[in-house]
Amino acid sequence: MSAAPLPAELVTRLRAARRVAVLTGAGISAESGVPTFREAQTGLWARYNPEELATPEAFRRNPKLVWEWYAWRRERVRQAEPNAGHRALVEIERRVPEFTLITQNVDGLHRRAGSHNILELHGNLFRAKCFSEDRPVESWPDGDESPPRCPRCGGLLRPDVVWFGETLPAGPLRAAEHAAATAEIFFSIGTSALVYPAADLPFKALATGAAVVEINPQPTPLSPHVTFSLNGAAGEILPALVARVWEPGGQQRP
Ligand code: BV8
């Protein structure tokens, strides 16, 4: 199925833009084979609701189960590669003078793809911290204890991600809010736009007059508010957009 034509107005505005901000969610990693956050989980995890596992209460109740869920997800991500959508964002960062990539994803695929100015609002699967001290550890033993113990205090280690009910890292959130409020164009890509405060960012961009572009095969609560709605897969739409805006042949008549 050929993708719908890209709006000429968006192509023109992106070509001239100086400040662009992008918010990504699990959907941009879907084409890398990484299941999205709310997709049915497979195998052992099928019976669990991710929103119930991604909480401090779940970890207190069953640290081994939660640690092993994240170990399973790390393994899935290790086997994955960044896809054409991740790579297109690297190209947009090269082309736009001020580009900020804000991600809700914890899979580290944007950095592996080559993006630089990344704000990880919800942490990263591949980092761990001490549950008792709330301080990061550089590495942890891959022994049979699950979860492993903190080398400093012997407390349990937990993934260095932001769980539901936990506050986001202040620095990245402040930088993301600034990027949203100053962007000329704000993209919301591959996110169900359900989780706050990240889901508030496109509204901050709209409030300051930015054009907001949503890329998602499905409608979301954000869809009625956006300036441009591109219904389809990020791995198809983003490379096509980069080609239309910046590649020599791409400058065909709109
Ligand atoms: C907080 C890390 C203070 C762990 C995650 C108002 C203000 C503030 C907070 C709240 C509020 N209202 C409610 C809250 C509480 C809560 C919240 O938002 N709940 C929701 C469910 C209502 N927020 C919090 O708890 C936050 N903390 O604000 O602290 C506070 C606390 C309590 C009360 C008030 C204030 C912390 C939120 C962070 C939670 N941690 N992840 C982990 O990953 O295990 S969030 C989790 O959801 C994921 O990380 C993910 O990043 C995030 C959003 O999900 P998506 O990325 O959108 O993924 P999803 O599967 O949902 O959707 C995928 C989309 O992709 C779909 O739309 C699909 O159509 C699309 N798609 C599929 N294929 C493709 C595609 N798109 C493009 N191309 C494709 N090929």
Image (tube, grey):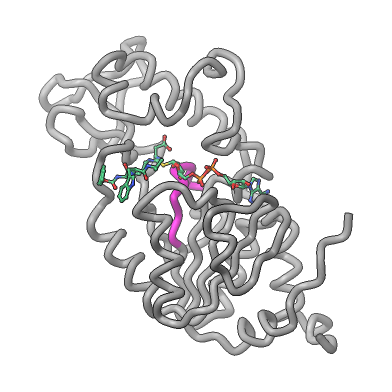
Q: Is the magenta stretch mostly helix, strand or loop?
A: loop
Residue 40 at x, y percent in the picture = 60, 27
- Residue occupying the point 38% across, 15% down: 65
Residue 112 at x, y percent in the picture = 53, 51
Q: In which quarter of the image is residue 251?
A: bottom right
Residue bounds of the magenta highlight: 102-109
Quadrant into which the N terminus falls: bottom right
Asked if residue 237 lies left or right of residue 21, the reply is right
Asked if residue 182 lies left or right of residue 222, the reply is left
Mark count: 0
| Ligand 1 image position (quadrant) | top left
Single out the residue that lies furthest toward the front: 224
- Residue occupying the point 24% across, 46% down: 167
Q: Nearer the viewer, residue 188 or 156?
A: 188
Residue 241 inside the magenta-drawn segment: no
Establish if 8 lies above or below 89: below
Residue 77 at x, y percent in the picture = 55, 35
Asked if residue 101 lies left or right of residue 1, the reply is left
Q: Nearer the viewer, residue 178 or 87?
A: 178
Residue 156 at x, y percent in the picture = 22, 21
Quadrant into which the C terminus falls: bottom right
- Residue occupying the point 43% across, 73% down: 205
Asked if residue 218 lies left or right of residue 126, the reply is right
Establish if 223 lies above or below 124: below
Residue 106 inside the magenta-drawn segment: yes
Establish if 92 lies above or below 249: above
Single out the residue that lies furthest toward the top: 144
Establish if 226 lies above or below 157: below
Q: Quadrant of residue 39?
A: top right
- Residue occupying the point 76% across, 73% down: 6
